[in-house]
Image (cartoon, grey):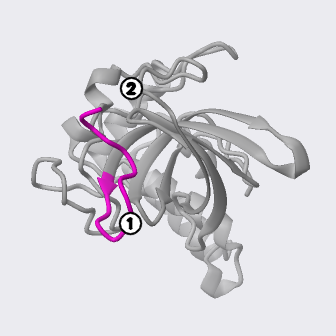
């Protein structure tokens, strides 16, 4: 997977101060006139980036919030990843950004991507402090294959889960994931949306990914108890 390092304005080749009609025209030109749409022979990954940029910049309120994140963007390698925890206050799916009307509770799922919207049990108590080597909750060692989904991609990836806690997880995958990006991890025992806090190169062309849980749904179909919340 190619890591997108440009912001949404650069993806659409417009300036941050561009009016809405210019952004709309740029998106349409890239998708149709320049034949970026897959139906016209374009690359699906490029089209996904264009759609993601338009999804944000084409919505005035979403664009306003995005502009604020650009002004507050951290600098330097030691800077922490931007906090995506505002998904609950904004009532937007942390994975695909689809708005939802009800409060985020256990059992609620996104109407667009079917991601679980129930907050992770210890997400609030974690205080957004999930860091590599500093996880507050007890880690449960796992060595299992899980299904990995990434925003803007239709196909699923496989990853090897290494450990999980009430605040985060770590896994090995072949994709290099940027800090602050969302991912959905699906296993027989749980379904979760998490945000990447670190991604490092590992042996065999793999990447070691550490992520903080945003949402979590424990699945009844899974055998045994995966996490004991009361422990």
Residue ID for mark 1:
222
220 in relation to 103, above or below: below
Q: Quadrant of the C terminus?
A: top left
Mark closer to the chain start, 2 or 1: 2
In the picture as drawn, the residue positioned furthest to the right comes out as 204
Near-viewer residue (125 or 227) = 227
Q: Closer to the camera: disc 2 or disc 1?
A: 1
Q: Quadrant of the N terminus?
A: bottom right
Q: CA distance from mark 2 to mark 1?
A: 41 Å
10 in relation to 220, above or below: above
In the picture as drawn, the residue positioned furthest to the front comes out as 224
Give residue 78's position: percent from left, percent from top: 65, 13
Q: Quadrant of residue 90?
A: top left
Secondary structure found at label 1: loop
Query: Is residue 225 within the magenta segment?
Result: yes
Q: In the figure, is residue 70 to the left or right of 40?
A: left
Numbered badge on residue 68: 2
Give residue 40's position: percent from left, percent from top: 65, 85
Q: Which residues are magenta?
A: 217-231
146 in relation to 121, above or below: below
Query: Is residue 151 within the magenta segment?
Result: no
């Amino acid at each position: 997977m190619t890591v997108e390092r440009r912001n949404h304005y650069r993806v659409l080749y417009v300036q941050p101060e561009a009016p809405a009609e210019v952004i709309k025209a740029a998106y349409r030109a890239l998708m149709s006139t320049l034949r970026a749409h897959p139906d016209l022979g374009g690359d699906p990954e490029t089209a996904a980036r264009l759609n993601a940029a338009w999804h944000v910049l084409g919505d005035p309120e979403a664009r306003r919030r995005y502009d604020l994140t650009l002004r507050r963007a951290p600098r330097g390698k030691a800077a922490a990843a931007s906090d995506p925890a505002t998904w609950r206050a904004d009532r937007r799916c942390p994975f695909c950004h689809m708005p939802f009307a009800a409060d985020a509770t256990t059992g609620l799922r996104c109407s667009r991507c079917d991601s679980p919207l129930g907050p992770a049990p210890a997400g609030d108590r974690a205080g957004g402090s999930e860091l590599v080597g500093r996880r507050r909750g007890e880690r449960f060692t796992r060595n299992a294959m899980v299904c990995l989904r990434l925003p803007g991609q239709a196909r699923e990836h496989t990853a090897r889960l290494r450990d999980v806690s009430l605040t985060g997880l770590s896994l090995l995958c072949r994709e290099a994931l940027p800090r602050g990006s969302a991912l959905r991890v699906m296993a027989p025992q749980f379904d979760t949306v998490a945000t990447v806090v670190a991604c490092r190169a590992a042996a065999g062309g793999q990447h070691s990914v550490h992520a903080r849980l945003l949402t979590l749904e424990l699945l009844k179909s899974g055998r045994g108890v995966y996490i004991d919340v009361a422990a």
